Each structure stands twice: as C-alpha cells, then as structure tokens.
Image: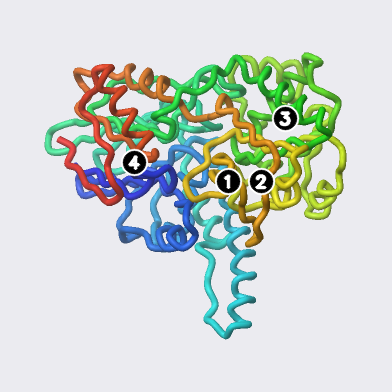
Amino acid sequence: MKLQFLGAAQTVTGSMHLLTANGSSVLLDCGLYQGKRGEAFERNRKLPFDASSIDAVVLSHAHIDHAGNLPNLVRSGFEGPIYATGATRDLSNVMLYDSAYVQERDTEYVNKQHRKRKEPPVEPLYTSEDVGQTVNQMVGVRYHQKVEVAEGITITFFDAGHVLGSAVTHIEVREGGQTRTIGFSGDLGRKNMPILRDPEPLGDVDFWISESTYGARIHEPVTGMEDKLMEILQRTIDRGGKLIVPAFSVGKTQEFLYVLFTLNDSGRLPSIPIFVDSPLSVNTTEVFKTHPECFDKETLKYLLNNEDPFGFGRLNYVRSVEESKKLNDLNEPCVIIASSGMCEAGRILHHLANNVGDPRHTILVVGFMAEHTLGRRIVERNPEIRIFGESHALKAEVAIMNSFSAHAGQDELVNYTKTIDSGKLKHVFLVHGEPVQAGQLTEKLAAAGYDRSSIPARGDVVELD
C-alpha cells in the first residue's frame, strides 16, 4: 500500500494525493493549484499520472483547490466514480460550471491577442461539457455510510465542519491479509462557527493526513467576531467609506452574511445597503438552502421560524455586470462582498481597482490568502499593488478578521488529532500548509505526544505498513 503526495504538499492549494493498494488507484481530491500564473497553468494542465489509470476519486469538499481540476481529470480519460457527500456534489455542480465559464471567457480574450500576434490559439483547461460529464460521474454518499470505492478499499465520511458538505474521510484498506486505516482531513473546520455543525471525530486510524493551513496560528475567538466586525464597520462608516470584503463564494460569503443577519436581528447593524456582487455566490447560497441537514441548531431554529439568514431586508444580490458597475458610482457607506476570495479573479478586482487608493474605505480580509496572490500582497500591506496590469497605491485601511476562518487553527488541529489514540497512530502527514505553518504544527503535535510526523514534498511516495 502506497501513498503519493501530488498536490497541497508544502503549499496550500491543489490538493491531490494518490492511494494505491490491491492493484487499485484511488485519488484523494483533485484540486486546482493557485499561485504564479505560468506555474499554475502547467501544473494544472499536466496531470502527474495517466488519468485512465485512476479507479475512483474521493472528494473532501467543493472548494476549487480541492475539486477544481476534476473536469480536466475526466477530460484526460478518467471514467470512474467520484465519491462525495450530496451537498458537495451539488456545490461542485455550481462551482465547476462557473470555473469552466471563466476559463472559456479568458481563453477567448487570450486568443484574440494571439491572433493579433499571429500566435497559435490556446484551449481552456476544460469546458462546460467536461463539467457536465464530471457531475454525471459523482456519487452522493451520506455521512457515516460505509462504501467500497475500490477492491479492498472502503471509506466513511464524517462531518468536517469546514464548508457545506465537507468531510473528514476514514479509509480502510484490506491488503495481504492485513487491514490498515487512514484518516484524511481535507480541510478541517472549527467549533462554534456560524451555520455548520462542529467537526466530528473520525475515530482511531493508523495514519493521519492532516491539513496545516494555520498550523502556526491560534485564531481569534469566534465569540468576539460580531463586536470586532461592528468596530471595523462603524469606523468605516464614520469616514464615509465602503467596507469591501473579498470572500469565497462557497462558505465564506454565507458565514459573513449570517453574522450580518444576527447583527441586523439584534438591531445593531447600521442602516446601510449590503451588496453581494457575485453570481456564483447567489447560486451557491441557493444550494445552501437545500441542505439543512448540514446546519447547526441555531441556523435550523431560524429556518423553522421562517427567517432567512441569507436573504434579510437590506441585502442586495447583484447578478448583472451593469449592476456591478453601478456600485463604483456609490459615494455613500455600504458593504460590498465579492469573489474571488484571494483576489485573483472576478468582480472583486474591479472594486479594489476603484477603491484601494481612497483612505476612507476598508478592505476586510476574512479568509486565507495564499502566497503569490493579490490577496496576500494586500494582507502584507504592500504600498503599491498591481490590478489588471496597472499600479495602485494601497491607501485604504486593511482589516483582518481571522475569527472568520473556516480552517482550524493550531490549537484546534492539535485537539482534533488528540481524538485519535496516539498509541495506535503510526504517523501523521502534514499537508495543505506552507512549510513554516506545518513545521510549527509538528512541534505542537510532538509536545502533545504525537511525535511521529512529517511534511511530505510534492511527489513523495511512502509505504504504509
């Protein structure tokens, strides 16, 4: 039995790990790598294996860095099943079609430039047709349902509490008269976050593949997020500015809206307009409404009282480009939530280009920003940033609220690992984290009695015995 780390190894994006046993190959996630443009293009297009050799895919959740390269896998010859929770399947349907649409439009633009320079045309990584086939290959699996995905390999999903439908996967492998168990965290959520249930322990395993996105950071407490948001919002309003929030369309937007809803429900939210400027966020929110089985008790209580946390009074969903452009002409305080979360594409770029140079406004960062992204440069408060190839002075306030993080922090990752018997656990593999984050997490795990851990590099292969 072998495990090969092919993505999100010593970096945060492009989750992809290959498990081989009994002559079968099972892929854990197939995400898009996000980073330097040229490197990302090559890594995403050129799969590190023959796609037709993969027997099945196990998908932890619908975020693009975990699911975004599935249509390319299918386009390249993969014909097997893709196992995911029902909510992940439905979210992936929305997410992947949007991803294909963006790629098709970007390719049209690039090819116009190529024609002018008499260069050969390029093709998108995948098309809407590829997405349709991918969704057809998805198999919905309930939490706690044991399913055989390949010969001698069974999986059971437990709620990861990270995003709607996210799963921690318990994998059981029977080979050569022996049984070995593997846990795969995908992205692990946090306790007491809005909307979703808390992460569930998966039980004891022999090997644990854990994310380490925030392995060196302890998040601000969830309980204080409303007060801090009010402080940031109020001082922005006092300056006559806009609060601009880059947010992932899946999960982060809905969590942020939920907190605004609770502030509105308690009468604390100032009377200003709120705009969700992302067609994908609109479609994603509709999927959320169809999966109450993933919600925590507080959210279910609102729904039972016929209250909609995702559609309260002054909330405006913006679909058309024309409506989006009109927001640039607003000279009054407002909240604008737009994707993409790392500021690498989408309508958020237009809002940033029009507002980062004005000190009245605030850029509120509520999610992780990977290396080499515009979002990271904003977090680092670079005095000059480039948007659409043009330089802009960053004069707007940059506020960071990591209490909104849907990823477990260092203490939460350690505490989750402690639900696994240290006497049974043979090894911990730390993935989905930059080296500094993963490195500090290994030290904390060792101090907690889990001293057999490593940080695999991309391409590393280990024998699990």
Check contact, mark 2 vs mark 1: CB within 8 A: yes
Q: How is the image coloured?
A: rainbow
| Nearer-N-terminus badge (3/2) | 3
Above-or-below relation of 223 to 360: above
Categorize mark 1 by other alpha carbons within 10 Å: few (<14), some (14-19), many (20+). Answer: few
Categorize mark 4 by other alpha carbons within 10 Å: few (<14), some (14-19), many (20+). Answer: many
- Left or right: 94 with respect to 352? left
The residue located at (47%, 46%) in the rendering is 371
Image quarter hosting the C terminus: top left
What is the C-alpha distance between the residues marked 4 and 1? Answer: 47 Å
Categorize mark 3 by other alpha carbons within 10 Å: few (<14), some (14-19), many (20+). Answer: many
| Nearer-N-terminus badge (3/4) | 4
Q: Which mark is residue 394?
A: 2
What is the C-alpha distance between the residues marked 3 and 4? Answer: 36 Å
| Nearer-N-terminus badge (1/3) | 3
| Residue named by callout 1 | 382
Query: Seen from this angle, which residue lies furthest left?
Result: 177
| Residue named by callout 4 | 149
**Which of the two residues, 169 or 15, is positioned nearer the viewer here?**
15
Q: Secondary structure at mark 1?
A: loop
Check contact, mark 4 vs mark 1: CB within 8 A: no
> How many numbered marks, from 0 up?
4
Categorize mark 2 by other alpha carbons within 10 Å: few (<14), some (14-19), many (20+). Answer: many
Q: What residue type is disc 3 on?
A: Phe
Q: Which mark is residue 310?
A: 3
What is the C-alpha distance between the residues marked 1 and 3? Answer: 34 Å
Q: What residue type is disc 4 on?
A: Val
What is the C-alpha distance between the residues marked 2 and 4? Answer: 50 Å
The residue located at (76%, 44%) in the rendering is 358
